Image (cartoon, helix red, strand yellow):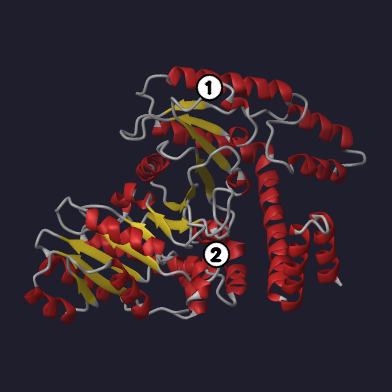
Amino acid sequence: MGRTEVVSRALSGDIRAVSRLISLIEDCVPGFEGLYSEIYPFTGKAHVIGITGPPGSGKSTLVDKMAAVCRERGKTVGIVAVDPTSPFTGGALLGDRLRMQRHALDDGVFIRSMGTRGQLGGISRATSGAVDVLDAAGYDYVIIETVGVGQSEVEIASIADTVVLVQVPGLGDDIQVIKAGVMEIGDLFAVNKKDRPGVERVVAEIRIALELSSVASRGGGGTSRIAGSAGHHGVSALGAAGSEREETVDEEAARPCWHPPILQTLAETGEGVGELFDACDEHMRYLAGTGELDDRRYRRARSETMQIASGRIWRGLTDDRGAFAAAEELAWKVARREIDPYSAGNELYEMIVK
Amino acid sequence: MGDSMGTDTGRKIRVLVAKPGLDGHDRGAKVVARALRDAGMEVIYTGLRQTPEQIVAAAIQEDVDVIAMSILSGAHNVLFPKVMDLLREKGVDDILVVGGGIIPDEDIPALKECGIADIFTPGTSTSETVKFIEENVKRRS
């Protein structure tokens, strides 16, 4: 399959081509940017749902059941399942697919496993590329399953339209749910393994935490999202400056607020998964109806653009032999306490940009 | 390969580890999966009781370089060739396929004949399997 052929066949939904294109992007093969730019105009149609939560909370099983619901409703789904890459060997054991193999023969379900390959935010650098390929190939939904997360892996919020945070009974006390981090990115909460003792308590704790956060952010324009949303509201206020300004402010105040629903699921049997899916659809209607969808996609575009630029700067640093040698030398100086890390960093920066 | 395989960019060898057939014993498959992981490969583990159709479909979606199958039940003479047939049917010719498990020596020539690159029977060290895969993957770009 030639590279131009890969693109046209992937756009028509050819499974081998979709699969190969994801690899080309994931491996950053020379010229992959060109392929990406050919598919990008065809993206933006799929509803991208992120599933995140602690290890062992049942994410893969939940995704498996969500895919089944999707198919019952006559929709197609692409799944990107991320598992950790070993920081020591670069290898990975990708086991999410194990729980989804019954969909292997259904052309309406595409499953792709990915290693994090050095990224720490819960997804890999290539995850958004894979999402875009699946979106362009015409899948109605794209579900991303993150690695099992702890407290601060919030990157999923920058690529998904809807983030489902999976919780299970028995993980900690009520202080855990009011901490900053992953708890703040859930658009929906799924309390899984609802047959276990303590499920009501988890639901109550999440509810209280959400009430606290809606009090805290009252007047702030909707639920709190990851850093960057405030900046964007600033931009739209500027854009609306002038005669329409007052009207826009009113509209902003009247914008209905999304209250993250808390659903109980038993992924193993599929109980509650239909309702969870309904809630995801409802969230998409909210996003589209309020204009929040555009805001989110803008934030994704911004973070991606910045990341690509900073990646190039970083590569420039490591590829440039002189800069690399200087970095090593500066690092020794810092380690010997001859200079501080900020001075060293600035010195290196000056050296690269000039 | 070499250096670029260990870092977070560039190509990694992707391997689908699968258990076709009905035997429910996957300790060997898990040991191999772990060894390949430790050798810096990305291993997609699909678990027990996979049909040849499921294995081939998964291999295509995962765009793997290698399919590693293990059978202990004695069904290798049927299931291994079936996987090879399906791959050919789909026009896939760049995946290295290896097998393992309880396979009598006299069956091995026919399996190799149908396209299985090599068969690793009990007693094979995992490093031997790793080395074979590293040296024989068909896709390098």
Residue B44 place in picture, x, y as percent:
36, 59
Q: On the rendered image, what quadrant is the N terminus of chain A found in?
A: bottom left
**For this view, does A343 lie left or right of residue A124?**
right
B80 is higher (above) or lower (below) than A176: below
Q: Secondary structure at mark 1?
A: loop
Question: Which chain does the residue under circle 2 lie in?
Answer: B
Q: Quadrant of residue A65?
A: top left
Number of residues whose C-alpha sits closer than 10 Å to that of mark 2, classed few (under 14), some (14–19) or many (20 or more): many
- As drawn, the residue found furthest toward the front would be A336
Q: Which residue is located at x 29 percent, y 61 percent? A: B32
- The span from disc 1 to disc 2 (Cα, nearest Å) is 37 Å
Q: Which residue is located at x 24 percent, y 64 percent? A: B69
Q: Quadrant of residue A118?
A: bottom right
The amino acid pointed to by label 1 is Asp
Q: Which residue is mark 1?
A: A173
Q: Is residue B92 visible?
A: no
* Viewer-closest of A124 and B38: B38
Q: On the rendered image, what quadrant is the C terminus of chain A found in?
A: bottom right
Residue A117 place in picture, x, y as percent:
53, 60
The amino acid pointed to by label 2 is Asp
Q: Which residue is mark 2?
A: B8
Callouts 1 and 2 on one subunit: no
